[in-house]
Image (cartoon, grey):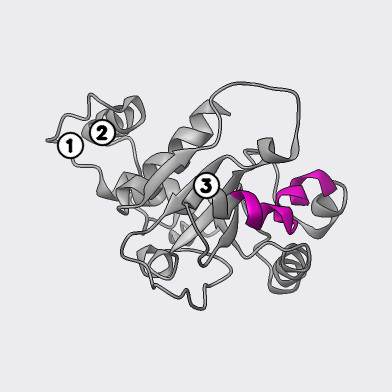
Amino acid sequence: MAVSETIVREYFELHDFFVRQNRKHIAPKREDDEIDFYVHNPNGPTDGGEVPFVLENARDLETLTRAVVVVKAWHTEVFTQAVLAHAPEMFRFAGPETFARATNAFGGPGPLTKILVIPALPTSGEARQQSIDLLHSKGIDAVIPFRTMLSDLIEHIEVNRNYQKSDLLQVIRILKNYDLFAPPQLELFDLPKPKRKAKV
């Protein structure tokens, strides 16, 4: 979980957000333990605005002002409707009491977005929309897939810089230096198929 939370923190800080971790210790589960981060965008819209449900790029992040973030690092799961239906505990942070705690944490009232960081949504249109509808009905305002965050970090890391203050960024830099990341435009399954030899 610590690595996943580091990815989330680095992603928001990359985009100039102020990030506050709600806790750094493991404690008995309470409602306030469900929130992993409070994030604030000093350049965000003062009165809030419409936030895309799936945050996929820097332009989407610009719609945020203040948010509570919960990280679900189930990296082997796709967040299908069936998976979500059997995990009601993940929605506890989206209840109305969150606003009171967040208002206190941010020092006053203001716009608030409840964000869930997830491994992935289904890729097919109908299944994807069903998952989005269910998440929205439970009070989730937006989601960010881990692939989005990792792709963005990889893209922005420069191999000629030393990121010694961040183990994660330094590892990404080293991997990029040795060309261990495939270009995003590489489509392995679109390669031309070899022609079959005619039978003699």
Q: Are marks 2 and 1 in contact (CB under 8 Å)?
A: yes
Q: Residues within 10 Å of mark 1 (few under 14, many from 20)?
A: some
Which secondary structure, mark 1? loop
User: Toward the viewer: 106 or 190?
Assistant: 106
Q: Amino acid at mark 2?
A: Arg
Residue 105 higher or lower than 121, as above or below: above
| Image mark count | 3
Quadrant of the snapshot with the N terminus:
top right
Magenta stretch mostly in which secondary structure?
helix
Is 119 left or right of 147, judged from the image as shown?
A: right
Report which residue position mark 3 lands on. Answer: 105
Report which residue position mark 2 lands on. Answer: 173
Q: Amino acid at mark 1?
A: Val
Report which residue position mark 1 lands on. Answer: 159
Is 34 left or right of 89, judged from the image as shown?
A: left
Task: Name the mark on residue 189.
Answer: none
Which numbered mark, 2 or 3, is in the foreground of this view?
Answer: 3
Q: Position of residue 193 (x, y in %)?
A: 48, 59
Looking at this rendering, what residue extends furthest in the left direction? 160
Mark positioned earlier in the residue sequence (3 or 1): 3
Q: Label 2, label 3: how many angstroms apart (C-alpha)?
A: 34 Å
User: Magenta segment range?
Assistant: 88-101
Quadrant of the snapshot with the C terminus:
bottom right
Is 156 left or right of 123, judged from the image as shown?
A: left
